[in-house]
Image: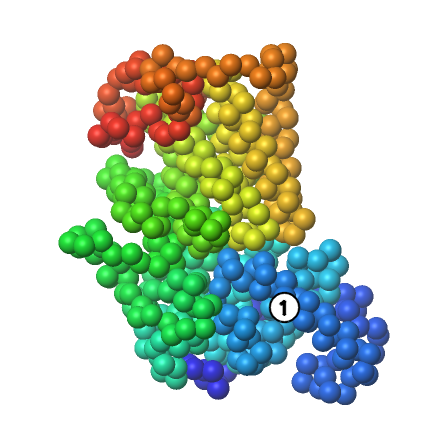
């Protein structure tokens, strides 16, 4: 039995599992990839006709290759591809792997597998780490397919089993495996991926509790992928307490990229939790803002660049940086004026919070949100092969695009080209991702429609100018240094001020018609931001 496994008690079946089971009634026989009366049982595949065995083997090998080429690098919880056959995962987990890989093929293949996946998982009494991995991978895939409710239910199943068998404890991974083995590392990665997925999947919902983040955990942090996939012994893993103490250490310690990704996700979770509150103290908001800035300030030089000198991309570090930018947008956008500038459209990822702030406070939040969206596009320009990135980035792409569109309505025409190029970059990424993940389809249409509606007049003015007009320097920008974030003009339909807070007058020195590369307030020590 897989470590931590125990017998299944029928009384433990959750309501979410019943909900999933009810959906199986909608799966018709036409959804099956097999002709009538020939659909094989996974436990009796030896009795299948040879032509079906051959086709099944060919398809499964293809799905597996697509999974490890595209999906696994972004969510590397299973053993490396070189060890997959030897590991001999249970059939239900292999079927989930096939389902994930099938999404990278033209539509139809994945739909044929979906019903079989649900049937296998909901009818299997196994309560082990492999079942946790199966439900977790399924949750990520379903969320990326824009099947959010089912994704949340699948994640609930994974979390329930994980907590039952004690995956939140450091001893779990080493009970039946050597501490420095790949298998033990796989189990540690599974727990942390469960936590990260819980946070990101919860964004569209304002009511889902953080179960993984609400229980004590001493699971060691994952190592870098270069060790995990390098056929060498896994190095000694760090504890989260060691990672949190890094700012107080005499010498700088370089932790794994996964460590920074975990902390980035935790900060994102803090933002989501704050946005759910109807009332909070200013210090809560400032504390999260401090955490966002500190995360970047304490990055060692080796973890600042997501592309190495050979052009290789650290996908996990890329995710860490983009999660921080995403968290910053979620923190500042609902407290800014930018939402009022967009057309009335339903966007499940745009954060909304109750309460109003002064005009100057909303201005600051608008600037910080715009800067975060700029950083998001900058990261994508370094790593343009969007197919290799996690589909979890789709909500951040949508939010970044909408933020840039709103900003174009308040900035001068001098920086329109900057915003236009960022928007087209984000649209291109969503366009490519929607070929695989349906979640990107709706996001792409929202961003494209809003851009076409709000940027039409600016496009006309821009097209009337020379194609290669001279670059302009701002009055406050030293020659040879082009910056790229502008201060948005206040919206006419901004919300009325209900609660004024102390906020220094904005120095005209910082108001500039040219976009800056960094937030214009990055050098100002303190601002009241509640």
Measured as percent of width and height from the top left, residue 408 is found at 51, 22
Q: Quadrant of the C terminus?
A: top left
Query: Residue at the spot x=33%, y=18% of the render?
Result: 478
Q: Which residue is mark 1?
A: 64
Residue 361 relative to residue 396: left or right: left
Query: Residue at the spot x=47%, y=41% of the render?
Result: 379
- Front-most of residues 2 and 285: 2
Query: For the view shown, which residue lies furthest in the front direction?
Result: 310
Measured as percent of width and height from the top left, residue 161 is found at 46, 73
Query: Residue at the spot x=34%, y=64% of the render?
Result: 221
Residue 286 relative to residue 42: left or right: left
Q: Can you say whether 179 is above or below 347 in the image? A: below
Q: Can you say whether 205 is above or below 153 in the image? A: above
Q: Is residue 318 visible?
A: no
- Front-most of residues 527 and 56: 56
Q: Secondary structure at mark 1?
A: helix
């Amino acid at each position: 039995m897989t470590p931590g496994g125990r017998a299944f008690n029928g009384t433990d079946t959750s309501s979410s599992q019943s909900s999933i089971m009810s959906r199986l009634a909608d799966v018709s026989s036409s959804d099956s990839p097999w002709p009538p009366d020939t659909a094989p049982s996974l436990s009796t595949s030896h009795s299948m006709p040879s032509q079906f065995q051959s086709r099944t083997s060919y398809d499964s090998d293809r799905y597996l290759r697509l999974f490890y080429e595209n999906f696994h690098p972004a969510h590397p919880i299973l053993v490396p591809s070189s060890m997959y056959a030897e590991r001999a995962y249970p059939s239900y987990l292999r079927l989930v792997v096939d389902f994930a890989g099938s999404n990278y093929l033209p539509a139809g293949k994945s739909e044929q597998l979906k019903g079989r996946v649900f049937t296998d998982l909901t009818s299997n009494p196994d309560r082990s780490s492999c079942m946790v991995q199966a439900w977790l991978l399924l949750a990520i895939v379903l969320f990326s397919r824009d099947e959010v409710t089912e994704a949340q239910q699948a994640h609930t199943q994974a979390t329930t089993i994980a907590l039952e068998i004690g995956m939140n404890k450091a001893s779990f991974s080493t009970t039946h495996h050597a501490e420095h083995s790949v298998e033990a590392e796989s189990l540690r990665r599974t727990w942390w991926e469960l936590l990260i997925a819980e946070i990101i999947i919860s964004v569209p919902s304002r009511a889902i509790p953080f179960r993984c983040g609400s229980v004590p955990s001493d699971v060691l942090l994952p190592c870098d992928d270069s060790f995990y996939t390098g056929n060498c012994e896994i190095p000694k893993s760090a504890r989260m307490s060691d990672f949190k103490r890094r700012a107080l250490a005499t010498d700088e310690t370089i932790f794994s990229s996964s460590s920074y990704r975990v902390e980035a996700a935790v900060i994102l979770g803090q933002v989501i939790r704050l946005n759910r509150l109807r009332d909070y103290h200013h210090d809560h908001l400032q504390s999260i803002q401090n955490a966002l800035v500190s995360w970047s300030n304490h990055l060692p030089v080796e973890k600042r660049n997501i592309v190495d000198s050979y052009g290789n991309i650290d996908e996990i570090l890329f995710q860490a940086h983009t999660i921080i930018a995403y968290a910053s947008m979620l923190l500042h956008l609902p407290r800014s004026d930018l939402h009022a500038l967009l057309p009335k459209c339903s966007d499940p990822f745009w954060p909304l919070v109750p309460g109003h702030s002064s005009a100057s406070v909303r201005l600051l939040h608008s600037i910080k949100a715009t800067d975060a969206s700029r950083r998001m596009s900058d990261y994508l320009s370094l790593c343009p092969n969007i197919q290799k990135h996690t589909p979890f980035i789709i909500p951040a792409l949508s939010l970044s695009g909408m933020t840039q569109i709103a900003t174009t309505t308040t900035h001068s025409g001098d920086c329109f080209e900057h915003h236009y190029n960022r928007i087209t970059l984000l649209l291109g990424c969503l366009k490519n991702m929607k070929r695989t993940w349906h979640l990107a389809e709706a996001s792409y249409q929202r961003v494209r429609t809003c851009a076409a509606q709000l940027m039409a007049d600016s496009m006309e003015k821009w097209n009337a100018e020379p194609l290669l007009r001279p670059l302009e320097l701002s009055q406050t920008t030293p020659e040879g240094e082009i910056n790229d974030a502008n201060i948005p003009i206040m919206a006419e339909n901004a919300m009325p001020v209900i609660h004024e807070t102390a906020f220094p007058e904005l120095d005209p020195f910082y108001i500039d018609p040219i976009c800056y590369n960094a937030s214009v307030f990055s050098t100002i020590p303190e601002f009241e931001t509640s």
